[in-house]
Image: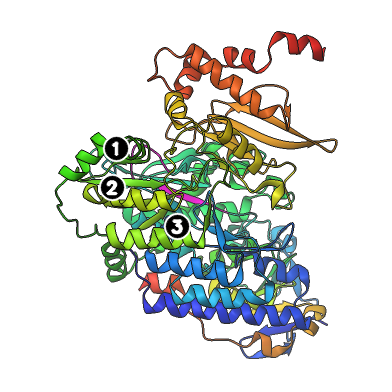
Amino acid sequence: MAILVTKEGFAPDDWAEGSILPFDVLWTGQDLPEEGLAVEFPNDRDAADLRPWLARLELIRVAFPAMADGRGFSIARRLRAMGYAGRLRAAGPLIADQFRAAQRVGFDEIELPESVAGRQPEEQWRPRPSLSYQDRLAG
Amino acid sequence: MYDYADFDRAFVQGRVAEFRDQVERRIAGSLTEEEFLPLRLRNGLYLQLHAYMYRIAIPYGTLNSRKLRQLAMISERWDRGYGHFTTRTNIQFNWPKLRDVPDMMAALAEVGMHSIQTSGNCVRNVTADHFAGAAADEIEDPRATAELLRQWSTDHPEFAWLPRKFKIGITAAPHDRAATKTHDIALRIVRDAEGAVGYEVSVGGGLGRTPMIAKTVREFLPKAELLPYIEAILEVYNLAGRRDNKHKARLKILVHEIGIDEVRARVEAVFEERLAAFRGVNPGLLAEIEAAFAPPAFVALPTEDYARAHAEDPVFRSWVDVNCVAHRRDDYAIATISLKPIGGTPGDATAAQMRLVADLAEAYAHDEVRVSHEQNLVLPHVPRAHLPAVHAALREAGLATANVGLVSDIIACPGMDYCSLATARSIPIAQQIAETFADLDAQRDIGPLKIKVSGCINACGHHHVGHIGILGLDRAGVENYQITLGGDAAEAAAIGERAGPGFAYDEIVPAVERLIEAYLDHRLEPGESFLEAYRRLGAAPFKAALYPPEERSDAA
């Protein structure tokens, strides 16, 4: 089972299994649940495609097919710039060294495959003191 | 020059601690080799043919005596007593041990240096005109922008995992000495009709196996809007750049595949949104960066003794005439120190040579040293009164070769002697060409000529933009060298044209000799350079010299 990493540490996934809809379900205009709307978002789509549902969505799960595929970082920033305020999840084999950047672009949590979580225990994901040039430039 | 603030020091030290931890996690098995690889690369550590290779950033090629002495110390303590200056104005050490690298990083951090983002699929070291701040023809010192971009790009959370490496080059002069058009983003500082300073922005340059000259995406960008514009380019590239094939992943391929107009439309749309949210750069910080590049306190010294030495000493005269160029002040010169001694390895400097250059910079030249993308060192601010003393000291150290810009001032990649990707030797080719034209008077007669040698199609030796480019390939286990003609990295940037079939290892240097003889035969007058003659005549007379008829019939 996948592990959820947040700034609090490791936890089991608290989102009801099977309730994250594929993006096409939104796109094809099927009936959507009144509450707990969650979507799976592939990283080769334009984040603007989610605009019509942004206010209703409670969770967006952005796929990271590989740790080196950084498209999700731009998608997350853009979703936050568009005003999305719900939970934002990165799902894929990211490593602890990427957690800080993921949070800085707007992710709340990482859904980590068990194989990675096994090698990289919780203490490696704890926040460390860090400096940011971008924050400094913004003043 | 930019003096590292407490923030930079703390950041770099944090990075050293982080890398130590990453090495430990790799050894303990927390990180797989596949996961560790990009972490090691973005800290400048490559695994090469014989050993690790460690690449250290020299932002916009600017050094002072303290930094140069530390590099000398590092080369002696953890390497083999020399370093190799690269075409992106970095320095590489070819023989470090993995376990020593964190200590080397700590030694760099002591003098405000690092190896952050010297490799990996991220924004790399920003390069600038090596005569910045000294050249008479520039609008302003481009290094203030380069430093702003260095800070902005360091550990940028959104752009740390791009499809491929990303290079930015900047110039503020009409004469492009920084080969900017071969970068992913080329910035040229310009003035608009009202005299306001801003940037001409071009995108999609690059060499490698698919060479491209950058195309202009924005004619004039107001200075204050630079960061959101660069971010817009990066966002478009991060999302749309190809990730299915590493050889097609650079921005140049996206520009080529969707066209510059479509790139412009996408970039401008993203820019509009990012600009609206942009609140500007912290003005105090910006002022601090700009102040760091204020000119040094120039001194007016009498130049009579210099003039006498120039008139009376032919060796000094030829060094001044070839290696020194006009400074923005008449009583100063910009002196280039050639790292291309005849028969040496282009771009290599020993620890003793680094220390000597540091001493000279400190004693005579406002404590500034530059690295040029042509792999030489530069003293950008030398009072002419001090030139005789500088020359005498350089001569004693074997650093006074008067060949800058001439046939033996060759760019060459490390080639098969060091590099695991190379398919042919490059350094020996450069050495043999230099030895063939060892006579400096003859070199001066040949005039300005840029020969560039790469040992594989990745083109680290920039052969595509050499007036004469040489590309070493492997043909069924045998080295074979292709010639390209008419390339240019300056403001009229052009990709060289392939001349024809390649040459064997022992045929390539005679072929270059024939090319140069053909140029000497065909030039209108000694003032017409090789490149000018090539542009006037086209390839035909040069191809005829490369492939004489009798050899053609032999081959048939």
The stretch in magenta equals B166-177
Q: Does the magenta stretch mainly form a helix, a strand or a loop? A: loop
- Residue type, numbered disc 2: Pro
Task: From the viewer's side, name the closer residue of B34 and B522.
Answer: B522
Asked if marks 2 and 3 fall on the same chain, the answer is yes
Chain identity of mark 1: B
Whether pointer 3 and pointer 1 mark residues with C-beta atoms closer than 8 Å, the reply is no
Q: Nearer the N terminus, badge 2 or badge 3? A: 3
**Cβ atoms under marks 2 and 1 closer than 8 Å:** yes
* Kind of residue at badge 1: Asp
Q: Are marks 2 and 1 on the same chain?
A: yes
Label 3, secondary structure: give it.
helix
CA separation in Å, label 2 and label 1: 10 Å
First in residue order: circle 3 vs circle 1: 3
CA distance for labels 2 and 3: 57 Å
Quadrant containing the N terminus of chain B in the rendered view: bottom left
Compared with B14, B334 (above or below) is above
* Residue at image location 44% in from the left, 21% down from the top: B532
Secondary element under disc 1, as helix, strand or loop, is loop
- Residue drawn where x is 57% and y is 72% of the image: B77
Task: Locate residue B510, reporting x and y percent.
Answer: 65, 24
- How many other residues sit within 10 Å of disc 2, few (<14), some (14-19) or many (≥20)? some
Image-quadrant location for residue A93 = bottom right
**At which x and y percent is residue B313?**
29, 37
Q: Residues within 10 Å of mark 1 (few under 14, many from 20)?
A: few
Tag 1 residue: B313
Disc 3/disc 1 C-alpha distance (Å): 63 Å
- Look at mark 2 in the image and give the residue it sits on: B388
Is the C-beta separation of discs 2 and 3 under 8 Å? no
Q: Is residue B171 something that shows in the picture? A: no
Q: Nearer the viewer, mark 2 or mark 3?
A: 2
Q: Which mark is residue B273?
A: 3
